[in-house]
Amino acid sequence: MSFIDYFKALKLEQRQAWIVAIAADVLQIAAFPLFAEGALSPADSVLDLIVGFVMIRLLGWHWALLPSAAAKLIPGADLFPTWTAAVWFVTRHKVQAGEQEVLPPGPAPEPRR
């Protein structure tokens, strides 16, 4: 499955989360000299707070978002796309409504008593 097919299969909120995460990571990586420790460092922190809030609104609370936010406290961690990695982790195993679950071949499982 290509990324385009995967992206099309996601719900609207999940697609929006991907776009926000990629945009935030690209901004932090491309503009890293501006967000390095110094006068504009608060801008990086504000960006991370906004992105974290938007992610929770779009995807709901998930533990994968916490390490992404915490990694931003480490100088130089902005060189790794942590928001994009977190969104991938949260959305990687979502089964869409109407999609059938494929079970492995073999006998049907016994009902629980």
Image: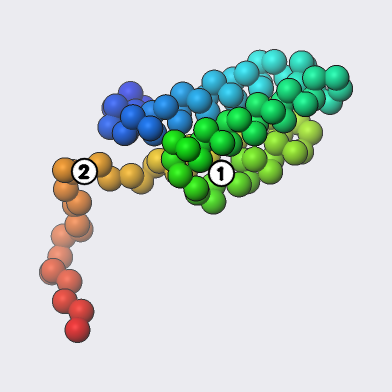
Is residue 50 found left or right of 16 in the rendered image?
Answer: right
Q: Residue 91's x, y, as percent?
A: 40, 41
Q: Secondary structure at mark 2?
A: loop
Q: Name the one closer to the observer, 88 or 49.
A: 49
Question: Quadrant of residue 10 in the image?
Answer: top left
Q: Residue 82's x, y, as percent?
A: 60, 35
Q: Residue 102's x, y, as percent?
A: 19, 52
For the point 46% across and 24% down, the residue is 19
- Labels 1 and 2: the sequence-earlier one: 1
* Residue 88 seen by the camera: no
Is residue 45 found left or right of 52 in the rendered image?
Answer: right
Residue farthest along the bottom direction in this orientation: 113
Q: Which residue is mark 1?
A: 65
Q: Residues within 10 Å of mark 1 (few under 14, many from 20)?
A: many
Is residue 19 found left or right of 29 in the rendered image?
Answer: left
Spatial CA span between label 1 and label 2: 24 Å
* Quadrant occupied by the N terminus: top left
Q: Secondary structure at mark 1?
A: helix
Is residue 69 found left or right of 14 in the rendered image?
Answer: right
The reply to whether the C-beta atoms of the residues labelled 1 and 2 are less than 8 Å apart is no
Residue farthest along the right direction in this orientation: 38
Q: Residue 57's x, y, as percent?
A: 47, 38
> With respect to residue 27, does 100 lie above or below?
below
Question: Quadrant of residue 45 in the image?
Answer: top right
Q: Which residue is mark 2?
A: 97
For the point 60% across and 47% down, the residue is 66
